Amino acid sequence: MTPPRQPDPAFPAGDSGAAEPVRRNVAHAQRRRTSLTKRILLAVAGAVAAVAVAVGAFAAYSYVDLSNGLHRSNITLPGAGTKKNVAESNILVMGLDSRLDENGNALPTDVYNALHAGNQGDGGYNANVLMLIHIPAGGKKAVGISIPRDDYAPLSGSPDGVSASKIKEAYGLALDQKLTELTKAGVAQADAYQQARTFARQTELQTVSDFLGGVRIDHFIEVTMAAFYQVAQAVQPVTVCVAQDTQDPYSGADFKAGVQQLTASQAVSFVRQRRDENNPSLNFTDLDRERRQQAFIVSLATKLKKADTFANPATLESLISAAKQNIALDSGFDLLSFASEAQHLAGGNITFTTLPITGYGVKDGKDVNLVDPNQIHAVVQQLLNPATATPTATPGATIPTGPPPTTTAPAPSPSPTASAPAGPNGTYTDPTAPLPSGGVPCVK
């Protein structure tokens, strides 16, 4: 039996808002995971993009109610004031591995049961999902750029004294630093928590912008883990396709090859899966999980385009409730203006790409993805400016620039194209190749 938790002196009993579990989670995020925690990391990129589409689609119906309840941060966005075309936008979506809502409160028990990812004592404040959505002007095809969470990168401002680490850790380290400073200064706990979250968002956005080569970021959308489940629950079932039979007891995944309809709980397992011990030849990596996130978004967008999802008042209410509890935006994000853009994305006019890595290594005792910054910058510029960028790098290609600075394993080789089964308008491709929208792609 687990012994009762002891109060944290930084958060006396009776305080409102984030409460004692927040400090435990912040500290927990900075420590190496136990073997159990490592097995239950959840990626929520599907939730982020799903919420992005959902928010835009129902914003016109419930704008006042929704806007009054959303968390917003007044931050300085990277590259603010340099936008040349007001009709284009770069939106960074961030999915946190926190098992708490945006106020730092515990989630309902039924949500924890569905997530199969522990409870409020697990997880932390790493930005386990980072995806830049580029919406160009003139109705051109949008681009989703997935940034692998373990890419080794310089961290803006060296939060908590850490100058470089996994790119996902900029958020949690900055949150811990600011929360500690404000608590010592006597700032009320609930205020300190929200101010620390704002500082963490600022730090993560600047870190990502620098990593991508100084890319301007116009807005951000942040969601907690619960958002994925709640959005999937509101619109279930969602169609996906897997190339081979696969099981993973840690995530709860149990899928047969081919096209299938997923419940909300199954959808969580689908995007969480990172291994199959019964079939080691599948050789799952985080890049495959990025691919599943993208595939789920594509499938969800297809469903939203074809179905009358937003004509159902109960569905709208569920989505609004999920957004209020588990989403945060920058203060300048105009949902009404974004509505038409989101509906455009729901129509399938977007392609997803995962940024390449050069291999695996160990930095400061942590397993990380090694990258070539010049390659990353070239790939990003080609994706954001296809008509003007110099084709120096093909998205997903590996361009060696000499031996990595640490002992590494080779970069993952492309997955073979599956001859069957093929989903509707979809094929199974390697996780570094662009994934077009408009169908139901088959994935590992």
Image (tube, rainbow, N blue to C red):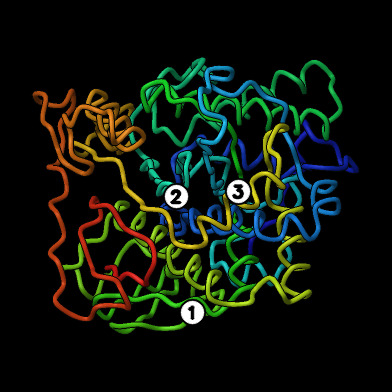
Splitting the image into 4 quarters, where does residue 240 fall? bottom left
Q: Which residue is mark 2?
A: 34
> Residue lying farthest right?
14
> Tag 1: Cα neighbours inside 10 Å, few (<14), some, or many (≥20)?
some
Of labels 2 and 1, earlier in sequence is: 2
Of labels 1 and 3, earlier in sequence is: 3
Q: Amino acid at mark 2?
A: Thr
Coordinates of residue 319 in the picture (x, y in percent) = 71, 64
Of labels 2 and 3, earlier in sequence is: 2
- Name the residue located 11 percent from the left edge and 24 percent from the top edge: 401
Q: Quadrant of the N terminus?
A: bottom right
Q: Amino acid at mark 1?
A: Leu
Distance between the alpha carbons at the discs numbered 1 and 3: 24 Å
Q: Which residue is mark 3?
A: 98
Q: Nearer the viewer, mark 1 or mark 3?
A: 1
Q: Nearer the viewer, mark 2 or mark 3?
A: 3
Q: Nearer the viewer, mark 2 or mark 1?
A: 1
Q: Which residue is mark 1?
A: 262
Tag 1 and tag 3, C-beta contact below 8 Å:
no
Q: Mark 2 falls on what kind of element?
A: loop
Q: Is residue 108 left or right of residue 172?
A: right
Distance between the alpha carbons at the discs numbered 2 and 1: 30 Å
Q: Mark 1 falls on what kind of element?
A: strand
- Name the residue located 54 percent from the left edge and 43 percent from the top edge: 94
Q: Is residue 437 left or right of residue 66?
A: left
113 in relation to 360, above or below: below
Q: Amino acid at mark 3?
A: Ser
Tag 2 and tag 3, C-beta contact below 8 Å:
no
Q: Quadrant of the C terminus?
A: bottom left
Coordinates of residue 110 in the picture (x, y in percent) = 69, 72
- Name the residue located 65 percent from the left edge and 25 percent from the top edge: 199
